[in-house]
Image (cartoon, helix red, strand yellow):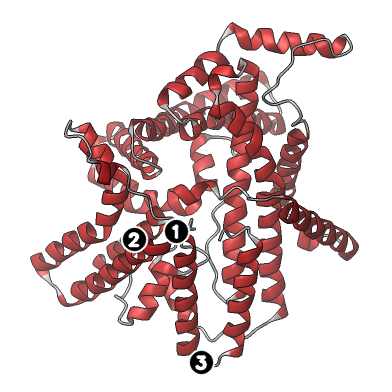
Amino acid sequence: MSLSDPSYIGFFAVVLLLFYLLPGRAVRLVLLLAASLAFYWIVSGVFVTVLLFVAAGTFAAGLALRRAGGRRRQLVFVAALLAVIAPLIVFKYLAFLLDAVGIGAPPAVAQLALPIGLSFFTFAAIGYLIDAHLELVEPERNPLRLALFVAFFPLVTAGPIERGGRLLPQFDRGIRFTAERAFGGLRLIFVGLVLKVLIADPLAAPVAAVFGDPESALPLEKLIAIVFFAFDLYADFAGYTLIAIGSARMLGIDVQPNFRQPFLSPTIPDFWRNWHMSLSFWVRDYLFLPMRAHWRRRGHFGLIAATLLSFVILGVWHGAGWQFALYGLAWGVLAVASLYTLRYRDAVYARLGVPRLAVRIIRAVITFFLVALVLVLFRANFLGDAVQFYRDIFSPGLLENLLAVIGGALHDGDGLELPMVAGYGFCWLLIAVVVAGDILVRNGITLAKCPMAIQVVVYNLGVATILYRWLSENVAPPFLYYKF
């Protein structure tokens, strides 16, 4: 059951109705926990035991940290981290680690399936333990509340990665149903469904065709595919996030945003401040800042080392393998290069007298294409496929393809055929809608501020189109981040 499926909408409607019909915070807490475990059982089956193990270990570790002191407290903290992170190591990284040291993973280990959302709820638990160890949060004494923090069903499969200090206190709030909160949550769910069902899913088909058989794709098709994939990933993950945040809001729980128009970012560091924000801020607070403080006397070397190592860890979070380590390293190199060249680029624009708006547009376009190029490492099935993408995109063949397409357009269509992306011209319209929507939102123009007549038309048209897609699609593509 995906958050974009009609079955989830029905599941959530039942939970929401019961939530406001049942009196008392304790009863609502039990309801939400039961609903969360039932939801995870539906999407991941027996792996709910892994979720319960992480929740139980986190709760026990929090109580142990409360009682421990001195050197024993440090030992308890390290043991707790190892226990909580153990399922992540076993299910996600053990096979790769055994192969990397030359032992070779046994078939039973190599074929282990990855529980949905394991990276997300494990990082939430680790963040809680670090905060408890540093006494930034009071260790939770109620096992049901702690379990709900780890397993809360809108967030458990793909985040956002919440902090205990933010989420746990909200479980005690006595929320009454209000139309304002309900409509606010529904609006987020609606926009999330539009992004996922009407934008991400159509973009996924040409992306899958090219990345699934890169040897058969022309250089221009590869370039188009990486542009499509960047928007596919954004619409897919941002859509999930909005559905999750909207669901939580309707239950009286406020969740931090996860995206803030990232493709309008002028630099790579700014992009990561607006993309997958709950993960990037987690890495910043729990990895980068401690390493930066530890290496503060190393000057620029310390800053560069902390940045590169943080991004490598962020890359490996996405998956086991050298490809993901290289993916993170690429982000780190681009972030460092952006940081240390920014003032020189500013000087060039100033000397040339480029208008400020033009500078913002140029920077956003350059940053987007850098992002799209790095995402090839994220999407390619094998590292060799990624290398092939880069080789073809930066080859003379791309220019030849472009000239052939332009020549065909000027001579009544007798030009180059692009069979793997043919018929997906409407994808460019979908991308234009995303870009225009982000520009409007960045400037404070949201759907909620539009005249009521426009809202009625948009909502009715959007709901009708989503229903049509649900009825016409046999199996909707799952959210891309479910496998992380």
In the rendering, at what x and y percent does residue 148 appear?
A: 42, 74
In the rendering, at what x and y percent does residue 237 appear?
A: 57, 49
Give the labeled residue for mark 1. 161
Residue at 50% across / 14% down in the picture? 391
Q: Is residue 109 left or right of residue 209?
A: left
The disc, 3 or 2, on the residue closer to the chain's N-terminal end is 3
Q: Residues within 10 Å of mark 3 (few under 14, many from 20)?
A: few
Q: Quadrant of the N terminus?
A: bottom right
The disc, 3 or 1, on the residue closer to the chain's N-terminal end is 3
Give the labeled residue for mark 3. 24
- The local secondary structure at tag 1 comes to loop
In the rendering, at what x and y percent does residue 334 appear?
A: 45, 29
Closer-to-camera residue (367/348)? 367
Give the labeled residue for mark 2. 127
Closer-to-camera residue (105/79)? 105
Closer-to-camera residue (250/320)? 320
Residue type of the residue flagged with mark 3: Gly
- Residue 41 appears in the picture as rendered: yes
The disc, 2 or 1, on the residue closer to the chain's N-terminal end is 2
Q: Nearer the viewer, mark 3 or mark 2?
A: 3
Q: Is residue 405 left or right of residue 244?
A: right
In the rendering, at what x and y percent does residue 13 appear?
A: 64, 75
Where 174 falls versus 243 (above or below)?
below
**Could you tell me if the residues under marks 2 and 1 are in contact, i.e. CB atoms within 8 Å?**
yes
Residue at 26% across / 50% down in the picture? 90
Q: Picture quarter containing residue 122?
A: bottom left
Residue type of the residue flagged with mark 2: Gly
